[in-house]
Image (cartoon, helix red, strand yellow):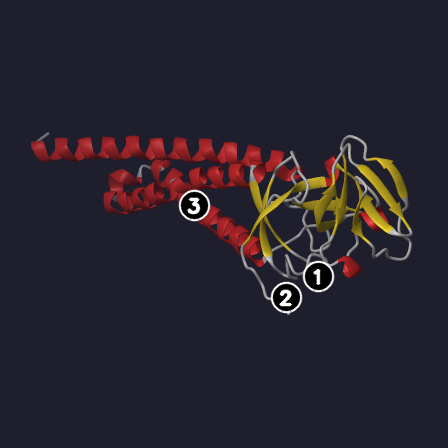
Amino acid sequence: MDFEDLNELEQQKKLMKKSKSLLISFFMFLIVDIALFIYLQKNQLFMFNLSKNDEMIPNSLITDIFSFFFYTIILISVIIFIILLIVTFKKVYNSNPSSYKKVINAADIFNIVPIFLFVAIVVNGFFFSLAQVDGESMVPTFCDKDTVIIYYNDNFVEEDIIIVKWDNHFIIKKIVGLPGDELLVDETGVYINNVLIETYLPAGFQEYDGIIPEGYYYILGDNREHSLDSRVINLIPQENILGEVIYNLTNGNCE
């Protein structure tokens, strides 16, 4: 065996070693991603939630594009790694080393996909999400079709704007009454700690006179005459609050 043959053999070993490393890394991260994907299906604001539909999930064009991009790139990367697995198993590196190098180079690039997906799943599943405002109940603060960033906060203060699940719908409102606040709702208006907050009361409003219990909040929309809020649906339990709206990405014109 001459020097050239030895060099070629050494190159084949390096390619084989790199191929195995890429395959192990890709499929290990992919398994972790799938496990997280399944676990986070319970998060109703998870962008990859398989049970979402237009009625129950506050969709956004941005989230739909984001999801489509990820599903597409994942499919491409899986196909590439299946090809790499096949050509490695069939020892194509012996018969066609140039093609084998091309597959490895492609796999090397797409090996970042499951890692990137892991980061995206963790961020979206445990920290932040996107949603689209549906309706005009928060005008002028938020317009219809505005896209907002939601932080999965569970420690709320007065004036926080939140996403609430109510009767299989998602609504965006502002907190005006906290646990421990004195709340009075009668025919004259809404009072928080003896301060008049709102005089407009829709038909069928819910009267209340007492202390807001622990774990409950009184919420109102900024567009008071066109808002379904605690004046009608009463106090909101904290488990129905999905997160706090922290930023408006689109800042639409409400006119």
Q: Amino acid at mark 2?
A: Cys
Residue 5: which quarter of the image?
Answer: top left
Q: Quadrant of residue 139?
A: bottom right
Residue drawn at point x = 43 percent, y = 37 percent: 115
Q: Is residue 18 left or right of residue 168?
A: left
* Circle 3 or circle 2, nearest the eye: 2
Q: Residues within 10 Å of mark 2 (few under 14, many from 20)?
A: few
Residue 136: numbered disc: 1
Residue 250 vs 43, above or below: the answer is below
Q: Is residue 209 above or below residue 13?
A: below
Classify mark 3: helix, strand or loop: helix
Evaluate if marks 1 and 2 touch, with contact meaning CB atoms under 8 Å apart: yes
Image spot of residue 236 (x, y percent): 78, 41
- The answer to which of 24 and 171 lies nearer the viewer is 171
Distance Cα–Cα, label 1 vs label 2? 8 Å
Determine crowd level at label 3: few under 14, some 14-19, many 20+ residues with C-alpha closer than 10 A.
many
